[in-house]
Image (tube, coloured by chain):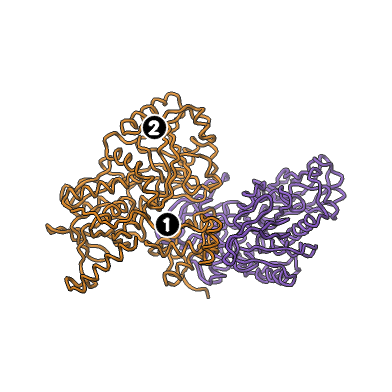
Chain colours: A orange, B purple
Amino acid sequence: MRRVGVALKQKLYAFVLCGFFILREGDVVLYDVVVAGAGVTGAFIARELSKYRLSVLVIDKESDVAMGTSKANSAIVHAGYDAVPGTLKAVLNIRGNKMMKRISEELDVSFKMTGSLVVCFSKDDIFELEELKIRGLKNGIDDLEVIGAERLREMEPNISPNAVAALYAPSAGIICPYELTLHAMENAVENGAELKLECELTGISYDGDAFRLETTKGIVECRYLVNAAGLYSDTVAEMAGDRSFRINPRKGEYVLLDKVYGSLVNSVIFQLPTDKGKGVLVAPTVDGNLLAGPNAEDIHDKSDTSTTSRGLLEVINVARLSVPSLDTRGIITSFAGLRAAGSTGDFIIGPSPVNKKLIHAAGIESPGLTAAPAIGEMVADLLKKSGLKLEEKSDFCPFIEKYIPSRKMSESQWNEAVKKDPAHGRIVCRCEKITEADIVSSIRRTIGARNVDAVKRRTRAGMGRCQGGFCSPRVIEILSKELGIPLEEVTKAGGKSVFLLKKTK
Amino acid sequence: MKKVDLVVIGGGPAGMAAAVKAKEKGVQDVLILERENNLGGILNQCIHNGFGLHYFGEELTGPEYAARFIDKVHRMNIPYLLETMVLNIDSDKTVTAVNSAEGVFTIKAKSIILAMGCRERTRGALNIPGTRPSGIYTAGTAQKYVNICGYMPGKSVVILGSGDIGLIMARRLALEGAQVKMVCELLPYSSGLTRNIVQCLDDYSIPLRLNHTVIAVHGKERLEGVTVAEVDQDRKPIPETAEFVPCDTLLLSVGLIPENELSRDAGIELDPVTSGPVVDNRMETLVEGIFACGNVAHVHDLVDNVSNESELAGESAAEYILGTNVPDREEAITVKAGNGIRYTVPRIIRKQSLSRNSVKIFFRVADVNRNVKLAARCGNNILLERKKVKVTPGEMETLELKAEDLQEIKAGEELVIEVKTNGEGQ
């Protein structure tokens, strides 16, 4: 996989030697496509484009991939009965759902097809389940079933005694959203795409031939621009003079429970949807925790991911309608994510009305995570329609190099690994049993972790019940050593989020 | 598979005291497994004094107290493995562990002593709303940064919770030049030792705000401040009292939780109040041959008590291994936390183990009270009563019952521990 990158560099080097052009620092590089946004949408667009002979650059203002909506969501692969038939949401949800199994194998992403249940608590509402089922049928899902209380309780022994029926969707599942984003982007990079982080887009101009992008890391030029900027995709559109849509942030708060409670439910438990979304769900996570949330609150500040006591209480209370035995003593952390709700109500995917070489992939709220691989395909197709030549590479490799964390190895594998590298025998995060080797690898991988939260998302170190109390001093030490920076410069999540200020007296 | 008579999980004060005592009592084959790179456990970072007054009769620092036991471990040639993490314990006493020298390995033990200690409650467990910046630490983690790593985690500090570690850290950070703005305590009383409130807060003019809590966290990257509010009698924040306190550091000292994930996986029954294994008067869990002591059994205030309790566990494990005292499990008295008592350790007394002179019952009261009697009774028969001027949940209490009195109680009967108030209130 890395061959590709090397091959490209060699070509570039050959160019330099031939004197066709000499690349100096400060020179403006012209890319075929720049993708603005390194969330799950941008990652799958980049991956799709990396199948073709194109120069592709992904830029993001944050210090890691998946730092917006992709980081904090319900982590669900939806079956696809919710969306209105005929909408992009419906079509791309179904397509994405069908692709996910293969994608998860190619990209080594944790994915479990647990099925989902929409639970209803009153006989009068069962017709709504039937309506959802019909909607699902129209969208092309033929395995939906309305099940009665008895079967429901067999499947979910801890479901509320008030539940009378449920819509069962066997094709729904759970996935790790940042692993999906990270691995998709790494696969794109390994196939030749470039990624520039902490690179904020500040201005766009178009000279009739190419876009000139002003960023916090200098000027970049591109022939085609893809807007996958999530919450900020309306801002990016506006920079290009396009005011055709708005993104309205809608906050959702979640609580995460200890693994001891992970088996409280077996599948994703929804309640009947409202006009603000699919409501508060209770679901296991791929790592064995239990997740409850989100509520829904329209807000104005696109950076406001703070939790509120009111919101968390609402989540717990509503979740308990489904699963009354949900124990708040099991909560190990809470968080909030923002949905990038588009002003049209549907995904906004298509060429900009002001310039067909600017393709929007905006308004990607739920079921965006599920739809992402399908959005990638669609955007590549739209670029083609706008004139971009898509010439397939013969050496595209859809597989990511698999990394098996120490704890997931068999005993003999683990022993072999320790013999080769003793760091496999040193547990740093005791709650999740993450070794020093796992952490070092997360820093050295294609898109390496640069801060403690990034290590956490890649390895789960600090994700457990002690929430980093024991392991963060060690993780800080390892980051400092691997990155060659002083301990005082190691951050939680980039910027000024340092842990240590100065040496003691 | 390696075979060892006694595996002690944890090389902190509990594990060391238990191992030393077991060897003294005749178990030749003892092995301590420790996950850190030193013996001594959390004592290594507790560089303040105040340890050992009861056990050694003199005042020591944490590392000094630990060193005395480390010396004993060395003198008695008790083997130990460092940076060794136990991954699993089976109820048949097979221990699976990993380290960088041996990889993954299993040990079949005749007996196991659990001495894994405890961890701190976190912000997540409290569900404090707000942003998620850096600068929020549990007090113990901050203590590690300062005392072990040699770095300051912040310069203006609010501490939530008046547990002992929080109080100790208030003083430690003040001594290092940080501005410690206040210690907030949700309850109307501190859960820390009185001497720590005097020596760590009063002496440094750090205000202790009782009935106060942190209701929000602010700051995008690094912590910029917290909102503090007074709480009413139901511990609900009173919105009008909310006050923004600028700070770059929030320390949490809001309780300790025994680390019993291994115990749970081994099928050992835990007490929902202590979060530690249910143990009998010999510190044996409900799985025969597996013992527990120190903070993994229940959270202690004083390491001196940990040492004593762990020696009892070590002695009991020795008796079990050598077969000198294996009491009939049917012949048991149940210990019940009665009026005003949160929990007791032990919860069971094995009648056939009462050859020793006495049984110490450790317990915590549920509320602060003055002029009370602490009592142990069986039915209407009062075995022991002790007057106390003041009791508080922050300080562990004990009643020492004579073996001969306990012999009077029939197997299957209850021994009730309770607080008797005389109606004068607080």
Disc assigned to residue B235: none
**Nearer to me, B409 or A485:** A485
The quarter of the picture where the N terminus of chain A appears is: bottom left
Could you classify mark 1 by the number of other residues whose Cα lies within 10 Å: few (under 14), some (14-19), or many (20 or more)? few
- Above or below residue B76? Residue B93 is above
Q: Is residue A114 left or right of residue A297?
A: right
Q: Position of residue A47 (x, y in %)?
A: 30, 54
Per the image, the residue denoted by label 1 is A402
**Nearer to me, B100 or A306:** B100
* Residue B251 visible within the image: no
Q: Position of residue A370 (x, y in %)?
A: 35, 44
User: What amino acid is labelled 1 in the image?
Assistant: Lys
User: What amino acid is labelled 2 in the image?
Assistant: Asp
Of marks 1 and 2, the one in the foreground: 1
Q: Residue at horizontal 43%, vertical 54%?
A: B131
Q: Position of residue B358 (x, y in %)?
A: 83, 54
Determine the secondary structure under disc 1: loop
Per the image, the residue denoted by label 2 is A143
Determine the secondary structure under disc 2: loop
Discs 1 and 2 lie in a common subunit: yes
